[in-house]
Image (cartoon, rainbow, N blue to C red):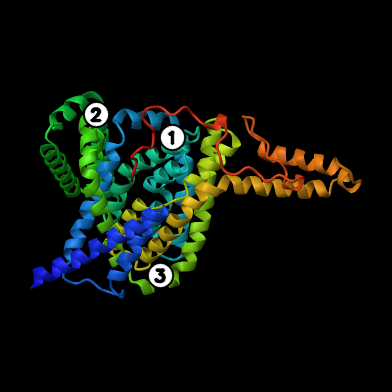
Amino acid sequence: MHTATVFIELGSVILVLGLLGRIAGRYGFSPIPLYLLGGLAFGTGGLLPLSASEEFVATGAEIGVVLLLLMLGLEYTAADLVTNLKAQYPAGAVDFLLNAIPGALAALLLGWGPVAAVVLAGVTWISSSGVIAKVLGDLGRLGNRETPVILSILVLEDLAMAVYLPILTALLAGAGLVAGSITLAIALATAGAVLFVALRYGRLISRFVSHDDPEKLLLVVLGLTLLVAGIAQQLQVSAAVGAFLVGIALSGEAAEGAHTLLSPLRDLFAAVFFVFFGLSTDPTSIPPVLLPALLLAAVTAVTKVATGYWAARRAGIATRGRWRAGGALVSRGEFSIVIAGLAVTAGIEPGLGPLATAYVLILVVTGPLAARYTQPAVERLGAVFARRRGAWAPEARAGGSAAGVAAGAGAAAVVASGPAAEVVLPVQGAGVEPVEDSPDAEDVLDPGPDQALDGLSR
């Protein structure tokens, strides 16, 4: 009878997830917020609380985290990571400072203590590459000049996870300074060793794993990933980091074949993970933290825009591309929930889970809107301010066409700042609407056979 109940509950959850995914796909947005809401509905205090299958869902959620990191590692080679680290580390440092510090300060202001501050710093720091990749594809920006800058920041965030997660795991386990330092040293040594082996012997490893039979390839890669993840967990390094390093070590046909075979499993268990996080959150606990979540979302949306703008400017991208890069980075998603989920499991702060849930729900919905409208909104505001400044200029008070000339010059100064020339937007007062979000020829790269963000998911 117990087994029948488990099957009924699991079947109901998976069926609902499939329907929610269809709804999200139909309207062109990420299914993550719907999965979180579904978890809230099935959890304690929800509409249909689960009881018999909760343990199975918890195990499935852990597998989901492992597969998310494995698939992320498969997207990059060791050479890619080393190249990005050398070229873009200043952008990664700015990204960390601008976006992790607000989360840490918010936790301290709420009186949650230093461990919760480290957790919330990670929640606000990491962007959702899965959502961002989909948005860039939908907007036709994969060939834009700012896209490699966006990708570099995402890669650096992924690489930083290999250091951040072991530190967080040690803190959540209550490890002292010595134990935490040992754990971090082990993590860094392991990551360095894997990168070295992948650079020198990646082809041999991939040749060993690769097989023409999809079944054997699937079993070998999945078994190796779970084995390494378990060993990493025993060493207090984090199972997720172990899975990420396995993905990096594989390349070529082995990586491509594993990516194709494991994608459906990743999607299934990742959805289960989001549901499990929702199960762990009481819906009645969200309203008290909704205002802090909104304020934190507003602040960190601005800091992500500033991050993308600075990084694109450093890369010599024109002004419009800078704003597009900033707006594209706003979305948070998978890994913000992964980080918060570790803290919820450790039980360090009751309000952290609800705050993270509300925070991610806000930014995973507004992120795609920011990617689409940040650049045109900034340009329209610039044109409005330019007209107002022109209206108070002496030439404007004298009448005639001087006001229009002054307004047009002001708009050009706002839009055409930066190292590269921009297409000047006409002033609305002249009877022409501003140009909508469409890349100029100078902002678009010739698309190659392999798009940088194809298949990227975090």
Q: Which residue is mark 3?
A: 286
Q: Which residue is mark 1?
A: 89
Q: Which mark sits nearer the N-terminus, 3 or 1?
A: 1
Q: Residue at x 92, y 46 (%)?
A: 398
Query: How packed is label 2: few (under 14 Cα within 10 Å), some, or many (20 or more)?
Result: some
SS of the residue at dot 2? Answer: helix
**Is 455 positioned to the left or the right of 447 in the image?**
left
Residue 161 appears in the rendering = yes
Quarter that holds the N terminus: bottom left
Kindly report which numbered mark, 2 or 1, lies closer to the viewer in this rendering: 2
SS of the residue at dot 1? Answer: helix
**Is 247 positioned to the left or the right of 88 in the image?**
left
Is there CB contact under 8 Å for labels 3 and 1?
no
Seen from the viewer's position, the closer of residues 298 and 35 is 35
Q: Which mark sits nearer the N-terminus, 2 or 3?
A: 2
Query: What amino acid is at disc 1?
Result: Tyr
- Asked which quadrant contains residue 269, the reply is bottom left
Q: Which mark sits nearer the N-terminus, 2 or 1?
A: 1
How far apart marks 2 and 1 lie (CA) works out to: 26 Å
Residue projecting furthest to the right: 398
Q: Which residue is mark 2?
A: 252
Residue 280 appears in the rendering = no
Kindly report which numbered mark, 2 or 3, lies closer to the viewer in this rendering: 2
How far apart marks 3 and 1 lie (CA) works out to: 36 Å
How far apart marks 2 and 3 lie (CA) works out to: 45 Å
Q: Residue at x 20, y 57 (%)?
A: 60
Query: How packed is label 3: few (under 14 Cα within 10 Å), some, or many (20 or more)?
Result: some
Seen from the viewer's position, the closer of residues 216 and 363 is 216
Query: What amino acid is at disc 2?
Result: Gly
